[in-house]
Amino acid sequence: MRIFSLANNKGGVTKTTTTVNLGYGLARAGRRVLIIDTDAQSNSTYSLLGHLDQEPTLFDVLINGVKITDAIVPTQQENLFLVPSSINLSAADLLMASAAGRERKLARAISTVKDFDYILIDTPPNLGVLTVNAFMACTDVIIPIALTTYALIGIGILESTMQELRENLDVELPIFGVVANLDDHTRLSTDVLAAVRDHFAGKVFDTVIPRNIKVEEAHNQIACLFDYAPASTGAQAYSKLVQEVLHRAEGA
Ligand SMILES: Nc1ncnc2c1ncn2[C@@H]1O[C@H](COP(=O)(O)OP(=O)(O)OP(=O)(O)O)[C@@H](O)[C@H]1O
Ligand SMILES: [Mg+2]
Protein backbone atom coordinates (compact mmCIF):
# COMPACT_ATOMS: atom_id res chain seq x y z
CA MET A 1 0.00 0.00 0.00
CA ARG A 2 1.45 3.37 -1.05
CA ILE A 3 0.51 6.29 1.20
CA PHE A 4 1.11 9.71 -0.34
CA SER A 5 0.97 12.99 1.56
CA LEU A 6 0.26 15.90 -0.78
CA ALA A 7 1.94 18.77 1.00
CA ASN A 8 3.09 22.34 0.52
CA ASN A 9 2.82 24.87 3.32
CA LYS A 10 1.96 27.55 0.78
CA GLY A 11 -1.77 28.04 0.24
CA GLY A 12 -3.64 27.66 -3.04
CA VAL A 13 -0.96 25.64 -4.85
CA THR A 14 -3.41 22.86 -5.91
CA LYS A 15 -2.86 20.32 -3.12
CA THR A 16 -6.58 19.54 -2.99
CA THR A 17 -7.22 19.59 -6.74
CA THR A 18 -4.27 17.26 -7.32
CA THR A 19 -5.35 14.93 -4.50
CA VAL A 20 -8.90 14.66 -5.84
CA ASN A 21 -7.95 14.23 -9.51
CA LEU A 22 -5.23 11.70 -8.74
CA GLY A 23 -7.80 9.90 -6.59
CA TYR A 24 -10.33 9.76 -9.42
CA GLY A 25 -7.67 8.80 -11.95
CA LEU A 26 -6.14 5.99 -9.90
CA ALA A 27 -9.61 4.65 -9.01
CA ARG A 28 -10.62 4.67 -12.69
CA ALA A 29 -7.42 2.77 -13.44
CA GLY A 30 -8.80 0.02 -11.21
CA ARG A 31 -6.92 0.78 -8.00
CA ARG A 32 -8.69 0.98 -4.65
CA VAL A 33 -8.05 4.47 -3.35
CA LEU A 34 -8.71 6.21 -0.04
CA ILE A 35 -8.48 10.00 0.29
CA ILE A 36 -7.97 11.33 3.81
CA ASP A 37 -8.84 15.02 4.21
CA THR A 38 -6.73 16.50 7.03
CA ASP A 39 -7.56 20.14 6.21
CA ALA A 40 -10.20 21.88 8.34
CA GLN A 41 -11.21 23.84 5.21
CA SER A 42 -12.63 20.46 4.05
CA ASN A 43 -12.21 21.28 0.35
CA SER A 44 -11.58 17.72 -0.79
CA THR A 45 -14.47 16.50 1.37
CA TYR A 46 -16.82 18.99 -0.26
CA SER A 47 -15.49 18.28 -3.73
CA LEU A 48 -16.14 14.55 -3.32
CA LEU A 49 -19.36 14.50 -1.28
CA GLY A 50 -21.04 17.81 -2.13
CA HIS A 51 -21.82 18.49 1.53
CA LEU A 52 -20.07 18.78 4.90
CA ASP A 53 -22.55 16.92 7.11
CA GLN A 54 -20.87 13.54 7.09
CA GLU A 55 -20.11 12.00 10.49
CA PRO A 56 -17.94 10.67 11.96
CA THR A 57 -14.99 12.65 10.58
CA LEU A 58 -11.23 12.62 10.95
CA PHE A 59 -11.70 14.86 13.99
CA ASP A 60 -13.55 12.03 15.76
CA VAL A 61 -10.77 9.60 14.80
CA LEU A 62 -7.94 11.83 16.07
CA ILE A 63 -9.64 13.37 19.10
CA ASN A 64 -12.54 11.11 20.16
CA GLY A 65 -11.10 7.65 19.62
CA VAL A 66 -13.45 6.66 16.78
CA LYS A 67 -12.04 3.88 14.56
CA ILE A 68 -10.86 5.21 11.20
CA THR A 69 -12.57 2.30 9.46
CA ASP A 70 -15.90 3.63 10.80
CA ALA A 71 -15.20 7.02 9.18
CA ILE A 72 -14.53 5.72 5.65
CA VAL A 73 -17.34 6.56 3.20
CA PRO A 74 -17.78 5.71 -0.48
CA THR A 75 -17.88 8.44 -3.16
CA GLN A 76 -19.74 8.60 -6.47
CA GLN A 77 -16.67 7.00 -8.09
CA GLU A 78 -16.29 3.24 -7.83
CA ASN A 79 -13.07 2.32 -5.95
CA LEU A 80 -12.71 5.81 -4.46
CA PHE A 81 -13.35 6.30 -0.74
CA LEU A 82 -12.96 9.20 1.69
CA VAL A 83 -12.29 9.93 5.33
CA PRO A 84 -13.99 13.34 5.60
CA SER A 85 -12.74 16.42 7.40
CA SER A 86 -14.71 18.99 9.36
CA ILE A 87 -14.22 22.57 10.49
CA ASN A 88 -13.54 21.54 14.09
CA LEU A 89 -10.18 20.14 12.93
CA SER A 90 -9.03 23.77 13.02
CA ALA A 91 -8.68 23.34 16.80
CA ALA A 92 -6.54 20.21 16.43
CA ASP A 93 -3.23 21.98 17.10
CA LEU A 94 -4.50 23.13 20.46
CA LEU A 95 -6.42 19.97 21.33
CA MET A 96 -3.52 17.67 20.45
CA ALA A 97 -0.78 19.88 21.94
CA SER A 98 -0.35 17.84 25.09
CA ALA A 99 -1.48 14.44 23.80
CA ALA A 100 1.12 11.68 24.13
CA GLY A 101 2.34 10.46 20.75
CA ARG A 102 0.44 13.26 19.05
CA GLU A 103 2.57 13.14 15.88
CA ARG A 104 1.67 9.51 15.21
CA LYS A 105 -2.07 9.45 15.79
CA LEU A 106 -2.91 9.31 12.09
CA ALA A 107 -0.18 6.73 11.43
CA ARG A 108 -1.61 4.50 14.15
CA ALA A 109 -5.12 4.89 12.76
CA ILE A 110 -3.97 4.12 9.20
CA SER A 111 -2.14 0.98 10.36
CA THR A 112 -5.60 -0.59 10.85
CA VAL A 113 -6.69 0.20 7.27
CA LYS A 114 -6.42 -2.68 4.82
CA ASP A 115 -7.49 -3.36 1.25
CA PHE A 116 -6.42 -0.13 -0.42
CA ASP A 117 -3.76 0.22 -3.11
CA TYR A 118 -3.27 3.94 -2.52
CA ILE A 119 -4.02 6.36 0.28
CA LEU A 120 -3.82 10.07 -0.62
CA ILE A 121 -3.64 12.52 2.26
CA ASP A 122 -4.70 16.11 1.51
CA THR A 123 -3.01 18.49 3.95
CA PRO A 124 -3.63 22.06 5.14
CA PRO A 125 -1.49 25.04 4.07
CA ASN A 126 0.67 25.06 7.20
CA LEU A 127 3.15 22.82 8.99
CA GLY A 128 1.03 22.26 12.11
CA VAL A 129 0.23 19.03 13.90
CA LEU A 130 -2.03 17.71 11.11
CA THR A 131 0.59 18.06 8.39
CA VAL A 132 3.17 16.49 10.71
CA ASN A 133 0.71 13.61 11.30
CA ALA A 134 0.36 13.21 7.52
CA PHE A 135 4.17 13.09 7.17
CA MET A 136 4.47 10.49 9.93
CA ALA A 137 1.75 8.36 8.32
CA CYS A 138 2.88 8.39 4.69
CA THR A 139 5.31 6.29 2.70
CA ASP A 140 6.08 9.17 0.31
CA VAL A 141 5.47 12.88 -0.23
CA ILE A 142 4.06 14.51 -3.37
CA ILE A 143 4.67 18.27 -3.55
CA PRO A 144 2.28 20.28 -5.74
CA ILE A 145 3.76 23.60 -6.86
CA ALA A 146 1.97 26.46 -8.63
CA LEU A 147 4.04 28.02 -11.40
CA THR A 148 3.55 31.54 -10.16
CA THR A 149 5.83 34.16 -8.65
CA TYR A 150 7.28 33.07 -5.30
CA ALA A 151 6.68 29.36 -6.08
CA LEU A 152 9.93 28.38 -4.38
CA ILE A 153 9.67 30.79 -1.46
CA GLY A 154 8.58 28.78 1.54
CA ILE A 155 9.79 25.51 0.02
CA GLY A 156 12.87 25.82 2.24
CA ILE A 157 10.65 25.73 5.33
CA LEU A 158 8.87 22.63 4.02
CA GLU A 159 12.17 20.94 3.28
CA SER A 160 13.76 21.78 6.62
CA THR A 161 10.65 20.59 8.49
CA MET A 162 10.79 17.31 6.58
CA GLN A 163 14.51 17.00 7.35
CA GLU A 164 13.89 17.62 11.04
CA LEU A 165 11.26 14.87 11.13
CA ARG A 166 13.63 12.47 9.36
CA GLU A 167 16.35 13.17 11.92
CA ASN A 168 14.27 13.34 15.09
CA LEU A 169 11.29 11.08 14.53
CA ASP A 170 12.86 8.28 12.54
CA VAL A 171 10.78 8.54 9.39
CA GLU A 172 12.08 8.19 5.81
CA LEU A 173 9.84 10.73 4.10
CA PRO A 174 11.07 10.38 0.51
CA ILE A 175 9.82 12.83 -2.11
CA PHE A 176 7.91 10.70 -4.65
CA GLY A 177 7.38 13.55 -7.04
CA VAL A 178 6.76 17.23 -7.61
CA VAL A 179 3.69 18.28 -9.64
CA ALA A 180 4.02 21.59 -11.48
CA ASN A 181 0.60 23.16 -11.86
CA LEU A 182 -1.25 26.26 -13.06
CA ASP A 183 1.00 26.60 -16.10
CA ASP A 184 -0.33 29.46 -18.21
CA HIS A 185 2.42 29.32 -20.82
CA THR A 186 3.74 32.74 -19.94
CA ARG A 187 7.38 33.63 -19.69
CA LEU A 188 6.94 33.61 -15.92
CA SER A 189 5.54 30.04 -15.86
CA THR A 190 8.36 28.83 -18.07
CA ASP A 191 11.02 30.48 -15.90
CA VAL A 192 9.50 29.21 -12.68
CA LEU A 193 9.22 25.68 -14.11
CA ALA A 194 12.91 25.76 -15.01
CA ALA A 195 13.76 26.88 -11.46
CA VAL A 196 11.56 24.14 -9.96
CA ARG A 197 13.16 21.46 -12.17
CA ASP A 198 16.57 22.73 -11.21
CA HIS A 199 15.76 22.72 -7.49
CA PHE A 200 14.15 19.27 -7.38
CA ALA A 201 16.43 17.59 -9.96
CA GLY A 202 14.73 14.43 -11.31
CA LYS A 203 11.71 14.59 -9.01
CA VAL A 204 9.45 16.84 -11.11
CA PHE A 205 6.90 14.88 -13.17
CA ASP A 206 7.21 15.37 -16.94
CA THR A 207 3.50 16.20 -17.06
CA VAL A 208 2.83 19.85 -16.26
CA ILE A 209 -0.78 20.71 -15.43
CA PRO A 210 -2.06 23.77 -17.32
CA ARG A 211 -4.27 26.44 -15.85
CA ASN A 212 -7.66 25.39 -17.25
CA ILE A 213 -11.05 26.63 -16.11
CA LYS A 214 -12.59 23.15 -16.56
CA VAL A 215 -10.48 21.92 -13.65
CA GLU A 216 -11.99 24.52 -11.34
CA GLU A 217 -15.51 24.02 -12.73
CA ALA A 218 -15.43 20.25 -12.16
CA HIS A 219 -14.27 20.85 -8.60
CA ASN A 220 -17.06 23.38 -7.93
CA GLN A 221 -19.73 21.18 -9.51
CA ILE A 222 -18.79 18.10 -7.46
CA ALA A 223 -18.01 16.35 -10.72
CA CYS A 224 -15.21 14.09 -11.83
CA LEU A 225 -13.03 16.10 -14.24
CA PHE A 226 -12.57 13.03 -16.48
CA ASP A 227 -16.37 12.84 -17.03
CA TYR A 228 -17.10 16.57 -16.87
CA ALA A 229 -14.62 17.69 -19.54
CA PRO A 230 -12.68 14.68 -20.82
CA ALA A 231 -11.22 16.54 -23.81
CA SER A 232 -10.05 19.54 -21.77
CA THR A 233 -6.35 20.27 -21.46
CA GLY A 234 -6.72 19.85 -17.69
CA ALA A 235 -8.27 16.36 -17.89
CA GLN A 236 -5.73 15.21 -20.46
CA ALA A 237 -2.83 16.44 -18.36
CA TYR A 238 -4.18 14.81 -15.20
CA SER A 239 -4.64 11.51 -17.14
CA LYS A 240 -1.00 11.63 -18.13
CA LEU A 241 0.02 12.43 -14.57
CA VAL A 242 -1.90 9.38 -13.33
CA GLN A 243 0.03 7.22 -15.82
CA GLU A 244 3.32 8.69 -14.61
CA VAL A 245 2.38 8.05 -10.99
CA LEU A 246 1.45 4.43 -11.81
CA HIS A 247 4.72 4.02 -13.69
CA ARG A 248 6.82 5.38 -10.83
CA ALA A 249 4.90 3.46 -8.17
CA GLU A 250 4.36 0.14 -9.94
CA GLY A 251 6.70 0.25 -12.92
CA ALA A 252 3.46 -0.16 -14.94
N1 LIG B 1 -5.31 23.39 -13.32
C1 LIG B 1 -6.09 24.35 -12.79
N2 LIG B 1 -6.61 25.31 -13.56
C2 LIG B 1 -7.39 26.29 -13.04
N3 LIG B 1 -7.68 26.40 -11.73
C3 LIG B 1 -7.18 25.46 -10.92
C4 LIG B 1 -6.36 24.39 -11.39
N4 LIG B 1 -6.00 23.63 -10.32
C5 LIG B 1 -6.58 24.19 -9.25
N5 LIG B 1 -7.28 25.28 -9.58
C6 LIG B 1 -8.01 26.19 -8.69
O1 LIG B 1 -7.03 26.88 -7.90
C7 LIG B 1 -7.52 27.10 -6.58
C8 LIG B 1 -6.55 26.51 -5.56
O2 LIG B 1 -6.51 25.10 -5.74
P1 LIG B 1 -6.60 24.12 -4.49
O3 LIG B 1 -7.76 24.44 -3.62
O4 LIG B 1 -6.51 22.73 -5.04
O5 LIG B 1 -5.24 24.50 -3.74
P2 LIG B 1 -4.77 24.07 -2.28
O6 LIG B 1 -3.27 24.03 -2.29
O7 LIG B 1 -5.45 22.82 -1.86
O8 LIG B 1 -5.29 25.28 -1.42
P3 LIG B 1 -5.27 25.40 0.20
O9 LIG B 1 -3.86 25.71 0.55
O10 LIG B 1 -6.24 26.50 0.51
O11 LIG B 1 -5.72 24.06 0.72
C9 LIG B 1 -8.90 26.46 -6.54
O12 LIG B 1 -9.87 27.45 -6.78
C10 LIG B 1 -8.88 25.46 -7.69
O13 LIG B 1 -10.17 25.19 -8.23
MG1 LIG C 1 -6.56 22.44 -0.14
Image (spheres, grey):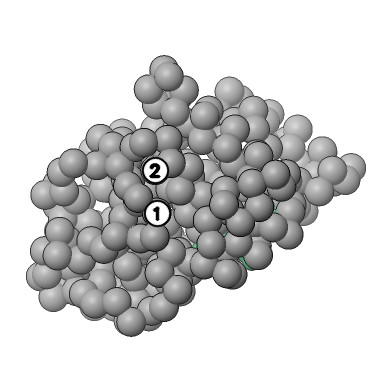
Quadrant for the C terminus in the image: top left
Place of residue 10 in the rendered image (x, y in percent of width and height, measured from the top left): 58, 59
For badge 1, the amino acid type reads Gln
Quadrant for the N terminus in the image: top left
Residue under the point 65% across and 33% down:
207
Above or below 215: residue 142: above
Q: Is residue 30 left or right of residue 193?
A: left
Place of residue 20 in the rendered image (x, y in percent of width and height, measured from the top left): 48, 54
Out of 45 and 159, give the one closest to the viewer.
Answer: 45
Residue 179, quarter of the rendered image: top right
Q: Which mark is residue 27?
A: 2
Tell me if mark 1 has few (under 14), some (14-19) or many (20+) residues whose alpha carbon lies within 10 angstroms of its own.
Answer: some
Above or below 215: residue 41: below
Out of 68 and 166, give the one closest to the viewer.
Answer: 68
Q: Is residue 231 left or right of residue 124?
A: right
Evaluate whether residue 164 shows in this view.
Answer: no
The answer to which of marks 1 and 2 sits earlier in the sequence is 2
Tell me if mark 2 has few (under 14), some (14-19) or many (20+) residues whose alpha carbon lies within 10 angstroms of its own.
Answer: many
Q: Quadrant of ligand 1?
A: bottom right
Number of numbered discs visible in the structure rendering: 2
Circles 1 and 2: CB distance less than 8 Å? yes
Place of residue 143 in the rendered image (x, y in percent of width and height, measured from the top left): 52, 44
Residue under the point 43% across and 64% down:
48
Q: Residue under circle 1?
A: 77
Place of residue 166 in the rendered image (x, y in percent of width and height, measured from the top left): 32, 39
